[in-house]
Image (cartoon, rainbow, N blue to C red):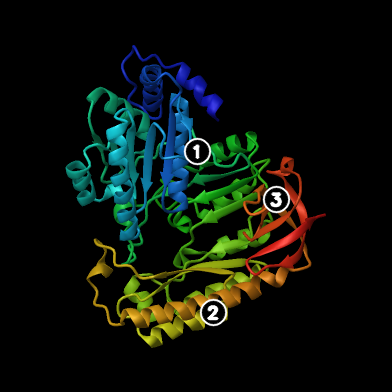
């Protein structure tokens, strides 16, 4: 993909007027930015480095791959260190403590900038979509060079050029957009698997969630553009695709010629060379019978669905504006398991939502005991300024909420350990992802159901799918042997 884009960039003449059409406008600025980079590198007497510090969800991870791809195309060398010559913080704002963490890093960066004035610092992502945050940056953190949001990540090269030419802080925030710009450089974290954005934004407006306000309304990419990208990735050696969206089950509703997510999923599996397809995230209210049928009939689709429950109490779910009930959630789970008995279900659960009583919490525990999730990501409710729930009255004390949270964690862990061990003794295909971080003699891979496996093997196998016997269950992962 990078080589193909290189060819397109090479056809651009920066002595001519800038193209208005995207992504050619960005190719123009990438080529222009290369000249600015060469001047900065010559002044420093060395090649320059860049570092993208990512917070938050898989959507942000994918955005960071795009940012890295653009910067490497300009000339920068990627680094994990915040000591890099250009550091961009790709922020999350789902919880307010995420904002505090970013401000903490900026405090450190202020000193770094004073000792290294040529260092460039950028802020982007969901946090930058909040007007009060941008006002704070402009007032207290004038040393930050570039500030941009979630809707114009693709404009990095243009913003970079504007910063060089302006000689001071550049702020470029879009409140919302229907524009979808892809076909730009991307630096994948893994050469054998990749995320693919299929849609952006969210229309659900859960009362605790800031995402619709910072990511904007739902907008779907054209299916032919998605399939074209998947084909390119396959040609580059990618075996596993993860389709990404705030609510993938809503895909296609905004298209002139609507297409369901199930139809798109089927088309993606038909691309030669793609051996596994995942997706994230599914809203329970939109998971269709058609989608269950497609997953059940197609072995390429991974046997894992992340199905955020949030609460087991229908009363609290109504307060959250989730638009399903405890009963309908359980019916959906039963339907999925009847057709895909080997499915792995994971979920999100919030404890301590305003107004939650002990009775409500016991409803949640009842669902946990009945569904028996492989894994549950559990959170204590955190008030998020700007959301409707931030104005709701609290009833439970901190001690009561902590007690409920501890009880939930304990039960989830017990069930998870039991459920994951149900595969012990089986031989299953594993996508080998890396050398184990804990033991350099072991490789780490992932089953179709997203469970990790560690086993002895040669690093040259990374990126391959191999059969592994699941010999020993460690509760949350397996120790195995290559077959």
Tell me the residue at 34%/11% (across/down).
Answer: 15
Q: Nearer the viewer, mark 3 or mark 2?
A: 3
Q: Name the residue carrying label 1.
A: 225
Quarter residue 392 falls in:
bottom left
As helix, strand or loop, the secondary structure at mark 2 comes to helix
What residue is rendered at 72% in x and 50% in y? 441
Q: Marks 3 and 2, Cα distance to the nearest angstrom?
A: 30 Å
Relative placement, left or right, of 453 versus 98 is right
Q: Which residue shows up at 25% across the image and 67% down it?
A: 388
- Residue 71 lies in what quarter of the image? top left
> First in sequence: mark 3 or mark 2?
2
Q: Earlier in the sequence, mark 3 or mark 1?
A: 1
**Disc 2 to disc 1, C-alpha distance:** 44 Å
Q: Nearer the viewer, mark 2 or mark 1?
A: 2
In this rendering, position of residue 440 left or right of residue 386: right
Residue matched to label 2: 411
Q: Are marks 3 and 1 in contact (CB under 8 Å)?
A: no
Dot 3 crowding, Cα within 10 Å, few <14, some 14–19, many 20+? many
Residue found at the far bottom of this picture? 359
Q: Which mark is residue 217?
A: none
In the rendered view of the protein, which quadrant contains the N terminus? Answer: top right
Q: Position of residue 183 (x, y in %)?
A: 47, 33
418 shown above or below 151: below
In depth, the one of 308 and 374 nearer the eye is 374
Identify whether 407 is placed above or below 24: below
From the top left corner, tell me how far across and down residue 229 is, in percent.
54, 37
Any part of residue 47 in sight: yes
**Disc 3 target residue:** 443
Number of marks present in the image shown: 3
């Amino acid at each position: 993909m990078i080589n193909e884009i290189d060819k397109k960039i090479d056809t651009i003449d920066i002595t001519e007027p800038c193209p208005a059409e995207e992504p050619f406008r960005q190719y123009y600025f990438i080529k222009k930015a290369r000249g600015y980079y060469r001047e900065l590198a010559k002044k420093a007497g060395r090649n320059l480095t860049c570092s993208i510090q990512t917070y938050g969800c898989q959507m942000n991870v994918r955005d960071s791959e795009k940012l890295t791809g653009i910067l490497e195309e300009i000339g920068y060398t990627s680094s994990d260190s915040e000591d890099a010559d250009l550091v961009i913080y790709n922020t999350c704002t789902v919880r307010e403590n995420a904002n505090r963490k970013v401000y903490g890093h900026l405090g450190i960066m202020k000193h770094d900038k004073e000792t290294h004035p040529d260092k460039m610092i950028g802020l982007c992502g969901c946090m930058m979509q909040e007007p009060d945050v941008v006002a704070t940056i402009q007032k207290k953190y004038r040393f930050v060079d570039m500030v941009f949001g979630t809707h114009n990540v693709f404009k990095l090269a243009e913003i970079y050029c504007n910063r060089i030419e302006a000689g001071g802080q550049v702020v470029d925030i879009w409140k919302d957009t229907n524009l979808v710009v892809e076909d730009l450089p991307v630096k994948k974290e893994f050469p054998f698997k990749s995320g693919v954005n299929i849609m952006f934004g969210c229309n659900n407006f859960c009362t605790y969630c800031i995402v619709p306000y910072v990511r904007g309304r739902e907008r779907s990419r054209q299916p032919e553009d998605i399939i074209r990208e998947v084909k390119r990735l396959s040609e580059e050696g990618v075996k596993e695709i993860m389709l990404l969206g705030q609510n993938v089950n809503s895909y296609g509703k905004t298209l002139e010629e609507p297409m369901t997510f199930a139809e798109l999923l089927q088309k993606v599996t038909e691309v030669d060379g793609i051996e596994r397809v995942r997706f994230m995230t599914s809203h329970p209210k939109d998971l269709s019978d058609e989608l269950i049928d497609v997953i059940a009939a197609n072995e390429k689709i991974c046997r894992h669905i992340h199905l955020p429950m949030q609460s087991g109490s229908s009363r609290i779910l109504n307060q959250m504006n989730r638009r399903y009930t405890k009963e309908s959630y359980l019916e959906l789970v039963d339907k999925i398991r009847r057709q895909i008995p080997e499915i792995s279900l994971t979920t999100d659960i919030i404890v301590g939502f305003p107004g939650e009583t002990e009775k409500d919490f016991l409803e949640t525990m009842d669902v946990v005991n009945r569904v028996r999730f492989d894994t549950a990501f559990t959170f204590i409710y955190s008030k998020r300024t700007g959301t409707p729930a931030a104005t709701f009255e609290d009833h439970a004390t901190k001690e009561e909420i902590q007690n409920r949270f501890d009880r939930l964690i304990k039960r989830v862990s017990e069930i998870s350990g039991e459920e994951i061990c149900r595969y012990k003794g089986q031989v299953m295909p594993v996508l080998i992802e890396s050398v184990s971080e804990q033991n350099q003699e072991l490789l780490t891979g992932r089953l179709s159901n997203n469970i990790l496996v560690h086993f002895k093997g040669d690093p040259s196998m990374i990126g391959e799918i191999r059969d592994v016997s699941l010999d020993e269950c460690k509760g949350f992962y397996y120790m195995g042997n290559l077959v």
